[in-house]
Image (tube, rainbow, N blue to C red):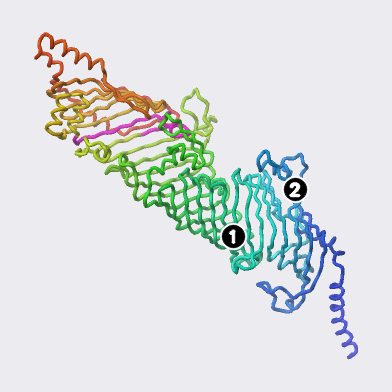
């Protein structure tokens, strides 16, 4: 029994020892076919070790996965493979004539004159080393605790149909073998990305860092993205854990895409899935709209901006959540700050962008880019086409409504103080922006203006949906014109309350003593694809009224061309004249504002304004007929014409009437000098302008027709 026991123990010790000696001295290059086959099966693509394959035996690597029991005492095989090649998935290995062929893909991704030869394989590696868990092989599992890459050259591809070569899939049938990769260590190499969807052709050159305690590798970036030049650099951790991923993986990057700058520094938890990000993010670009190609998030056109804040993100297969919190920065000359929340949602729901944005000091001119009202020079600076004609005032830059259906939004924006020109008395702005199913609502959009408020409810339908008859709802107004593919339906209701006259016209000295207020309402509807086209096709009503106040006597005399009275007011001093009422009532039909009522009634004069404002042609055609009350000395009273373009308006006098009155005085002077004064003296009519009736009509709430319907003006009794 003793001899048997000794022999058995000796055998149990000798067999593993002999096996270990044999395996250590075995030429493992003979095992490459088997290893290549098993790994290819697990990866679902070609895997070939073309160089030498060597084997040593070491204890299990120290780390979170360390087995403290008897398993941890078993030495593991440590393999070193040279000249390793990993191919593309079989589904991507298409004939050269097909559009998803890698070479064809590269030609489409870059410019027409540049064709990049894309390798047929996904990666080639000068050398990589890895350990194998021998006990895991018994369960048909290739468990690799640490995989070290030396000199990797990786080519990542994504075709126009969404197929890519970096998703590890084994094919239609599940493999009997599983690959479990726990950690990755990078050294010097390169990664080349060609993406037909993003139109990207970018290369990252990777190198090791030996002196930085926080980072293990550095990289430099160069290439093209959507036609823009890409450059940048950054750092990352040396060891990437793929199994125990609770330890944050450090990342730092500075990237430039065209004129867009992106800087991040922080950490990624579970980096294989980007499950959690915690970073400091800095952004700058010529316009927020330029971020759409990079992020897929619809943002408005703005002047050049820069922001910095804290970015937190969690990503899932169907739900991702990003928070850009406590950010601050500049948009044009205005400051900006707040927090934004972005969530992806399972189909058919769209991603949702929500948050609060506040500007403590807003330059009013910075709002111009939102509607294309900035200069052509500023348009070029923010990357938009310089499309504004030199002789036009209304912005012609089109809205990109095709992007509106890619996201929903709920944003609150406020500007606590507004810097503006003296002629524009606006102090504060608040609005709620709501975008859903391609329909944008600004409700309300409120300005604190001239001591009162200007409040609007704006509804813009850019969904492009069709009605029951199959007609595009967002179509051109006139029936004889075909629908405009990118047009939007718009309705707008505007309410002006308690606007102080002297604050509304701060540069007009004649109104600085006035105590009057302006109130008004407007309701318009239209279909178009820019501010200019919307106003050119608008229908509805615009009404304003002043039911009390005062106005400069000198201003009235100048309008009435009462020369003697003007001279007297200059000699004796100006004074305020009671303003009984002012009422305006415009009917808007197909972009033409036609006066139904436009009366200014004071104790000294009545001004009757008639004509139209053509917003389609940007032309003015108004006639002002002054009717003085009471005795006027040297009155050359004649109609005034306000004509010309919005860009260059002109005011002129009816020279015919003026000549008749002056000519009559000259003729009488020959016969009777005293009588010559009679044509120049105006006793003035005592007719009442009917303020009560005018104010009652002006108070009726304007009503606009539905978009696409022509406004029918009410008959007005003369």
Residue underneath mark 2: 91
Please indicate, yes or no, whether residue 225 appears anywhere in the rendered image: yes
> SS at mark 1?
loop
Q: Is residue 215 left or right of residue 341?
A: right
Give the side of residue 347 with respect to residue 500, left or right: right
Q: Is residue 641 above or below residue 161?
A: above
Name which quarter of the figure residue 236 lies in.
Answer: bottom right
Decide which of tag 2 and tag 1 comes sooner along the chain: 2
Task: Provide the residue span drawn in magenta.
Answer: 523-550
Question: In the shown orientation, is residue 128 left or right of residue 667?
Answer: right
Image quarter where the N terminus lies is bottom right
Q: Is residue 383 above or below residue 618?
A: below
Please provide percent x and percent y for residue 179: 74, 62
Q: Nearer the viewer, residue 66 or 557?
A: 557
Residue at left offset 55%, top offset 52%: 344
Badge 1 crowding class, 10 Å Cα cut-off, few under 14, some 14 to 19, many 20 or more, is some
What residue is rendered at 74% in x and 55% in y? 123
Residue drawn at (73%, 44%), measured in percent from left and top? 103
Q: Position of residue 599 (x, y in %)?
A: 24, 27
Q: Which mark is residue 275?
A: 1
Q: Is residue 524 magenta?
A: yes
Where in the figure is residue 145, as x and y percent of width and height?
Answer: 71, 68
Nearer to us in this view, 209 or 56: 209
Q: Residue 313's mark?
A: none
The front one of 541 and 30 is 30
Residue 37 seen: no
Separation of residues labelled 2 and 1 (CA atoms): 28 Å
């Amino acid at each position: 029994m003793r001899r048997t026991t000794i022999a058995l123990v000796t055998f149990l010790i000798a067999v593993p020892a002999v096996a270990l000696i044999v395996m250590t001295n075995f030429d493992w290059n003979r095992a490459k076919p088997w290893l290549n086959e098993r790994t290819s099966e697990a990866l679902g693509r070609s895997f070939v070790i073309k160089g030498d394959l060597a084997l040593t035996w070491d204890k299990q690597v120290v780390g979170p996965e360390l087995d403290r029991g008897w398993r941890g005492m078993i030495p593991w095989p440590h393999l070193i493979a040279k000249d390793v090649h990993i191919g593309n998935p079989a589904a991507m290995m298409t004939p050269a004539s097909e559009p998803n062929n890698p070479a064809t893909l590269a030609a489409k991704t870059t410019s027409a004159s540049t064709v990049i030869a894309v390798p047929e394989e996904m990666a080639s590696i000068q050398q990589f080393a890895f350990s194998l868990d021998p006990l895991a092989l018994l369960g048909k599992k290739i468990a690799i605790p640490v995989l070290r890459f030396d000199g990797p050259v990786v080519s990542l591809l994504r075709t126009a149909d969404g197929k890519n070569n970096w998703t590890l899939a084994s094919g239609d049938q599940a493999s009997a073998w599983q690959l479990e990769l726990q950690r990755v260590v990078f050294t010097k190499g390169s990664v080349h990305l060609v993406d037909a969807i993003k139109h990207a052709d970018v290369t990252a050159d990777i190198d090791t860092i030996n002196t930085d305690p926080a980072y293990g590798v550095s990289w430099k970036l160069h290439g093209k993205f959507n036609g823009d030049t890409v450059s940048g650099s950054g750092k990352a951790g040396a060891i990437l854990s793929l199994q125990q991923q609770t330890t944050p993986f450090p990342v730092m990057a500075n990237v430039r895409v065209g004129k867009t700058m992106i800087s991040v520094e922080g950490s990624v938890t579970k980096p294989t899935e980007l499950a959690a990000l915690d970073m400091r993010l800095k952004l700058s670009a010529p316009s927020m709209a330029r971020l759409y190609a990079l992020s897929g998030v619809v943002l408005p056109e703005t002047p050049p901006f820069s922001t910095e804040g804290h970015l937190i993100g969690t990503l899932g297969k169907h739900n991702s959540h990003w928070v850009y919190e406590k950010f601050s920065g500049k948009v044009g000359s205005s400051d900006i700050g707040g927090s934004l929340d972005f969530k992806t949602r399972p189909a058919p729901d769209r991603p949702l962008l929500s948050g609060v944005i506040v500007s403590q000091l807003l330059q009013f001119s910075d709002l111009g880019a939102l509607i294309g009202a900035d200069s052509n020079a500023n348009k070029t600076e923010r990357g938009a086409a310089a499309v504004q004609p030199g002789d036009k005032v209304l912005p012609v830059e089109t809205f990109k409504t095709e992007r509106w259906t890619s996201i929903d939004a709920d944003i609150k924006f406020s500007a606590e103080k507004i810097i503006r020109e003296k002629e524009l008395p606006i102090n504060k702005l608040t609005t709620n922006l709501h975008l859903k199913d391609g329909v944008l609502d600004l409700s309300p959009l409120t300005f604190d203006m001239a001591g009162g408020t200007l409040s609007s409810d704006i509804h813009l339908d850019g969904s492009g949906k069709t009605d029951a008859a199959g007609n595009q709802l967002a179509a051109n107004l006139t029936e004889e014109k075909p629908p405009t593919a990118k047009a939007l339906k718009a309705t707008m209701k505007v309410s002006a309350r308690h606007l102080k006259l002297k604050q509304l016209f701060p540069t007009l000295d004649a109104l600085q003593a006035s105590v009057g207020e302006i109130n008004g309402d407007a309701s318009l509807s239209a279909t178009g694809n820019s501010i200019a086209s919307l106003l050119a096709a608008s229908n509805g009503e615009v009404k304003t009224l002043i039911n009390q106040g005062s106005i400069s006597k000198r201003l009235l005399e100048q309008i009435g061309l009462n020369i003697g009275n003007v001279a007297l007011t200059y000699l004796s001093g100006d004074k305020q004249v009671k303003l009984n009422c002012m009422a305006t009532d415009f009917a808007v039909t197909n972009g033409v504002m036609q006066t139904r009522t436009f009366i200014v009634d004071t104790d000294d004069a009545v001004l009757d304004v008639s004509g139209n404002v053509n917003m389609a042609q940007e032309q003015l055609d108004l006639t002002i007929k002054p009717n003085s009350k009471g005795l006027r000395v040297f009155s050359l009273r004649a109609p005034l014409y306000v004509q010309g373009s919005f860009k260059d308006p002109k005011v002129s006098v009816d020279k015919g009437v003026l000549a008749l009155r002056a000519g009559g005085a000259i003729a009488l002077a020959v016969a009777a000098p005293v009588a010559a004064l009679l044509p120049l003296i105006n006793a003035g009519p005592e007719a009442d302008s009917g303020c009560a009736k005018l104010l009652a009509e002006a108070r009726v709430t304007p009503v606009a027709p539905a978009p696409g319907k022509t406004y029918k003006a009410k008959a007005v009794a003369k």
